[in-house]
Amino acid sequence: MMEIEIEENCAQSNDQTPEKKAVNELKDMCLDNAQYFSKDSSENGQRLYNSFLTLIDALDLIWPKVCSIKIRVTEFDIDETTPGNGYRSFINVFNMSVTYASGLIRNVTSQRSSASFEKTLPTKDIETCSHLISSLDTCFGHLQTMMSWMSDGNLFPEHKSMDEMISVCRGINQYCFYGRCVGFQFCQSLRAILQFVSLSMAIFSEAYYTQGLNSGSLFAKAKNSVVTAVKYILDPELRARRIVNISENADVDFCKSFWFLSECTPMNGLPSVVGVDVCQAISLTPQPFALEIDDRIIEVPVPSSYLGPKPVHLRLISYKLRRGMLGSKNKAPSEPPADGLIVHCHGGGFVSQSSKSHESYLRDWAKRLNVPIISVDYSLAPEAPFPRAHEEMLYAYCWILKNHHLLGSTGKRIIAAGDSAGANLLLSLTLKCVNENIPPPHGVFVAYVPTLIKFVPSPSRLLCMMDPMLPFGFMMRCLKAYACPIGQPELGGGYHSDTESFEEISESDLDELQAHKSPVSDASDTLTYGSLTSNPEEEIDGKGAEEIEKNEIYATRIVQEYILSTKEAEPPRSSTADDTCTESSTSTMESVQLKVTDFVANIKGQFTKFLKESADRKKKTPKESAVQNEHETQGRSPAPHKKLSSSLLEEVCNFSVPRDPYLSPYLASDEDLNMFPTTKILTVELDPCLDDCVMFAKRLKRLGKDVTLDILQGLPHGFLNFSLISEDAHAGSKLCVQRIRELLDPESSVNPANLT
């Protein structure tokens, strides 16, 4: 009874709001078109008539639910000045769906009387809109249930089991989110890119699962690839069905392979647009070394979990060559060491990508901030699950503390910066430093970070049911691969991971330590490095150097042909440390963005051929059979409701994530969080990890810590990787630079001019 009263009061009080007006206008347009097409006896005319009526019914059902959520939505914000949480995100998604549907229906209204009006395409578009609103209605029903579980602004009802999470996800029609209206909720400059990503995923899946099964000439393979591309371009419903099927049935190896394309596709040539003086690989031979802190000496252990001792790889990026920097021998550095240094950790779901795939924005950051960036290439799951990457980050960070002079920095301000999975590792690194009494970074910047590695039904995590970058199945399998390795005992609670403890040593132990070669001495074989132009992938990744080299030759040709046919002059560098973009650099960036946008629009045919040639060769797996079975029904219309596959349900319900703060920094104690440095968190309203960021920021703020939370609109998870090809993503990257600059120089935050 109370729920009915709330909905009625809310509906009455919101008659004059812009949102309610937009809904009423949409319903009026639907009613007008329904009356018009009721007289059309053709098949498409009647389908349009029924779709408009269905859309009106869906709007009548969803609006009271939207109102009931809006009443309490402010309870879950971090504060009044930073509105943002998963509930707000869904309200904005609903508003975007109304805008999207209104635009389509206005086109129908303006053209319906024309003799040349073709009803086939509008019919499918309006039917998709009705499915979209109906699916959102289902989501809002689940959101109401979630809200009933939560109190005191908590977005994580941890007392709810995995079964509740699965029940929340059941019955949501995912097809409508990945078909004709894919990316409707994102900003305009990213919609075409996300559509391209979705198309690429569908095309790549066929190449991935049929590689080696279909023999034939290169011409035949290229022809099949083109046919596949055309098929998914012309049939969005087929593409949606394929993507949902992949999300639910493809294993983690598919995720790794698809995300790895960012390193070997034609986009690989884009980072070179931003020229830097230094971009080189560093390999640390696994040997223990001594770290001197004040009057203490600590022996840093070698990472050993799962893989045993192996080199830890880094990548140094600097806009200018600085004195003392590795690789400066026989050169004449023009710059003294910088006071600042950025320790970066890349994202990729813990299972994929590297510093190379994030180089596009790292080069830009190095230029704008004018400080060296050292990025850590940690080992990836499932071969190297938790805590291996955590151990390697600790080892690399301690080496950086000891040897920052080799990286062109005085070490006066060391800032940790990372995104997604890498951001999680940086928070756990900071927590480990606090516990081991090692100097933590002077500041931490994290972007769209998962802070609770547990599948609790938070509202923002429901966004993964419609996310083209992070679908539900991908997220589940990647986190499971990292947190719950098969055949390994669960890690205990608390702070007891497999990470070897750091040990303090006395003067009597120094003689023994001298037996180890210094990792920075000239005679040491502990540190090796080489120019990235000399095939760094063979050194860093070991992912088939010959095949990668072949792919890069092809990719370079495509980049030159489609993007860089007209060479851009590198913008003149300023002799000062001022990183403000000049007119020349801005013009160059705009020109490059235009060329890349054109590239995205025209590369599809060439890209499909590349995907076919570069797909990993692997034998057919049971998961593949599920994906391939989708072909048998490709001619059918999508079901109105797509339930999660039984294989995915069984897989995600049969594992338990350990409650380890080094895995989930949100679980850290108040005592440890009180020792955290200044922390700046940036996320996006449409990110499945939004609530993770909000809740972690709330904990820090409640403890009186210096924390900043930025929530950007219209951008997807992982937007930094698109910063060179999207104006909105580039603006978001510039805000990241500003927040990092504030950590490097706290006084800069009071200068509004630095935001430009």
Image (spheres, grey):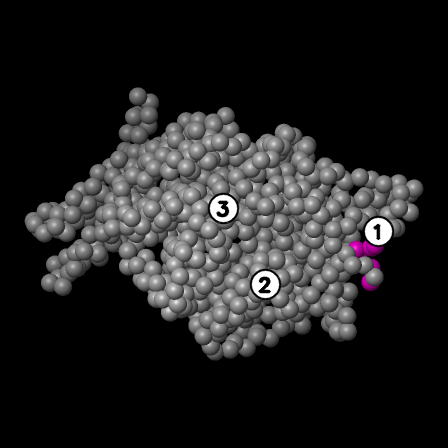
Expressed as whole percent of the image width and height from the top left, the position of residue 144 reads 37, 31
- Label 1: element kind: loop
Look at 54% across and 51% down and name the residue there.
352
Q: Are marks 2 and 3 in contact (CB under 8 Å)?
A: no
Instruction: State the residue in front, 168 or 415.
Output: 168
Which residue is the site of mark 1?
516
Q: Quadrant of the C terminus?
A: bottom right
**Element class at badge 2:** helix
Nearer the N terminus, badge 1 or badge 3?
3
Alpha carbon separation for disc pair 1 and 3: 39 Å
| Residue 696 visible in the displayed image | no
Depth check, front residue: 66 or 535 = 535
Q: Which residues are magenta?
A: 516-522
Check the image and report above or below for 589 versus 390.
below
Q: Amino acid at mark 1?
A: His
Q: Name the chief secondary structure element in magenta.
A: loop
Quick one: 584 or 182, which is closer to the camera?
182
The Cα atoms of the two marked residues, 1 and 2, are separated by 32 Å
Along the polypeptide, which appears first: circle 1 or circle 2?
A: 1
In front: mark 1 or mark 2?
2
The residue at which mark 3 appears reads as 252
- Nearest to the observer: residue 546 or residue 711: 546
Which residue type does callout 2 highlight? Ala
**Residue 235, image x and y in percent?**
28, 56
Number of residues whose C-alpha sits closer than 10 Å to that of mark 1, classed few (under 14), some (14–19) or many (20 or more): some
The reply to whether residue 550 is in sight is yes
Which residue does the numbered mark 2 point to in the structure image?
Answer: 545
Mark found first going from the N terminus, 2 or 3: 3
